[in-house]
Image (tube, coloured by chain):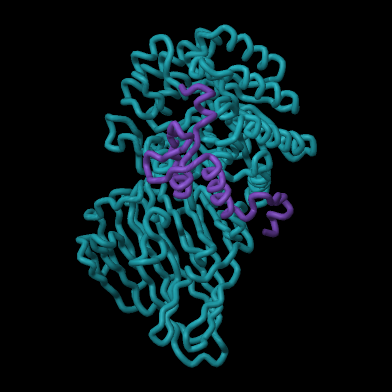
Amino acid sequence: MASADKLKKIMRCPVCFGRDIDVLMCHDENAKHYCIKCGFNGEESEVRAMYLDIKKKFHWISKRITLEEQLNL
Amino acid sequence: MYFNIIHRTAVAELADGPYYEIYKRQQDLAHSLGMKTTIAIQYSDLFDETVLRDARAYQAEFGDELALSLHRLAGPGLDELASGLNPIWLFDVLKKRQILSLILNKWKDVFGSYPKGVTSYHFDSSSLNILKEIAPEVETVIGGCFEEGVRVFHGCNHSWYLFNEGMPWGPWYPSKGHSLRPAKNETDAAGVVALPHLCRDMSLSYEGRNDFWASHPPNVIRGMGNDASFCPYDLNLIDQYRMQEKFNNNESYYNTFVNSSWLDWNHNSEYPPEVSWTLYEKMLAYCSELKSKGELTDMTISEYGAHYRKQNPIQYKKPDVYWAKEMLYGSGKHYFWYIDSTRRMLFDTTQGGSIGDLRPYIGELDGSTGPDTPNREIGTFPYLIQSQYRTGAAHHYEDGARTTLLLTHKGETVDLCHYPTKGVDIIRDGGCVIFKLTPATVSFNDGLTVKVTTSIHCYDDGQTKFERAIELPSDYNSELLVTEYLKGCYGKTEYAEDMHAISLNIDNKIEHNFDYSGQEFSVSQGQTASAIVPQLNITVGLKTDNTVSESSSARVGHLFSPYYTLKINYKISKTRSVSTWLQLTNLKK
């Protein structure tokens, strides 16, 4: 089982995740993350920016839709 | 709405993390909100005095249920038997019996009787039957993860071998022969009430990975459906399940089962644990709020199992339906789901009411898993139609498994699947459920517009009637060809299976074996077109509603399009309704 410290550094490849596939990236001595399944590599800030891009498809990510509203949806 | 909270102890499994403390915090949270839980205790934890003492105290003070969890098969005597394999459904029958005997007898030693509730990600028929044989006291199980299979397998780097697609999304009576098929009567039933492991999003579970979109806030984080500690989707999903009461005799069911490891640093999330904890807390707080308003009743799993038996006696069990309204992408899509002991169907209103998924339970196909079965690890109940795995509407080559309506005018054919509609209503009429769709206005190149309004009548004997009200301009002076269309196959994954044993039949006048020849056969004014699929022990067919047709036809596919196609063609020249039956029958009855 991975320790908490190790888990804190783990990030999923944003390119593979864009295809709904969880691939945990490795990181090198320059703090760059790289994917072992595709060619993606980048720093944490770039990875997090790509995560935000992935979320853009969820137009209603911030929308509360109550029961009454769902009845008329 | 009825609600179960399940917490797993999982001490030995997670010995190097603060997981027992997190589990206790989960328990404290539920109790502080005035709700009871079901504590799922694993075999290895039956040897831990702290776990047992705490669990008994929770039971005494809050009415929590102590249930057996089969998630991790390890501990004294079990390590040698299981050899590191955790899923009970993946052992051979002998090992299933040895493992279940060991675990259940230890439980009886500790508690003095067998458990009433048992949890597993999935039970296949043999593990369920052995469980019930050893411990007849077991009344309720958590017995399957809705639509977990191909997509989760791919999504987890092809490493998660849990295939149990084709199951009910809500509580059901598993049959003896296939645990995912709802039993048709007491004789057919395995003797337990089964509950799903989590309640899934009935739109996104069809379109993508079902594990992200469920009653499990950390999994929604995994799917990136949250904005840090803000995730209205978690509450929207609860409300969508509440909405189903309107269509299901005032009953709906919801549960949550979040293991403590999901509330700590986790490789499936890029957020710190505070985020998953906050969202878990918000979800339970909302459920507590609903409880205080009298709109939610919390129970343990066995309490719910007993309630379900009383409210839905198997001999009077009515079909369940689910009106799914997509609510994360904001697509406005609606799906209708239908299930009874003869079949499970999904109607895609965005494609004019096409069937996107069809599981023909009526064939009563048996299925267990394990190395001693031909199914090995694939516990899925097979489909006849699965439009996500098997192409569905055409986009770059031929279409695949689906149904639709085709309209042909002056040589131009339009496909109703390209005319998005929505659900209007679900009506129950005796043994029939009627799904009503908004009209679609279909346009042709010469300016002709035709309004098509679909209603789908599902009967609990395996028959479905597609009723199409077709409105033509009053001065229409041509003939419109209307084709009810079914393209089918069978399978459990996205790959084609061997179709050789299938045969096609038109009006008992033409019969042709599936020889991959690509040939099409037709009978003028034919009334039926059907496919006999011995692999699933069923016949699937289209039949006119006693209306004179132009023709009926059947086509054998080829290796680049391994499907059978059934059609009933009607010619109309004025406004009228056209009704066609989709019939499923058991080959041996």
Q: Residue B307, relative to residue B316: is it above or below?
A: above
Q: Quadrant of residue B558?
A: bottom left
Q: Position of residue B530 (x, y in %)?
A: 33, 63
Chain drawn purple in the picture: A
Q: According to the colouring, which chain is cyan? A: B
Q: Nearer the viewer, residue B332 or B362?
A: B332
Which residue lies at the image location 46% right of the left edge and 38% below the top edge? A33
Q: For this view, does B244 lie left or right of residue B530?
A: right
The answer to whether residue B180 of the structure is visible from this angle is no
Quadrant that contains the N terminus of chain B: top right
Residue B286's place in the image compared with B59, above or below, is below
State whether residue A10 is above or below residue B499. Answer: above
Can residue A68 be seen by looking at this rendering?
A: yes
On the image, which quarter does residue A25 sit in?
A: top left
Q: Looking at the image, which residue sits at the far front?
A: A30
Residue depicted at x 57% and y 20%: B19
Residue B261 left/right relative to B356: right
Position in image of residue A54 (x %, y %): 54, 50
For the residue pair B200 and B307, the one nearer the viewer reads as: B200
Instruction: Identify the residue at horizontal 42%, vertical 45% (top origin).
Output: A40
In x, y percent, where is residue B335? 55, 57
Q: Position of residue B174 (x, y in %)?
A: 47, 36
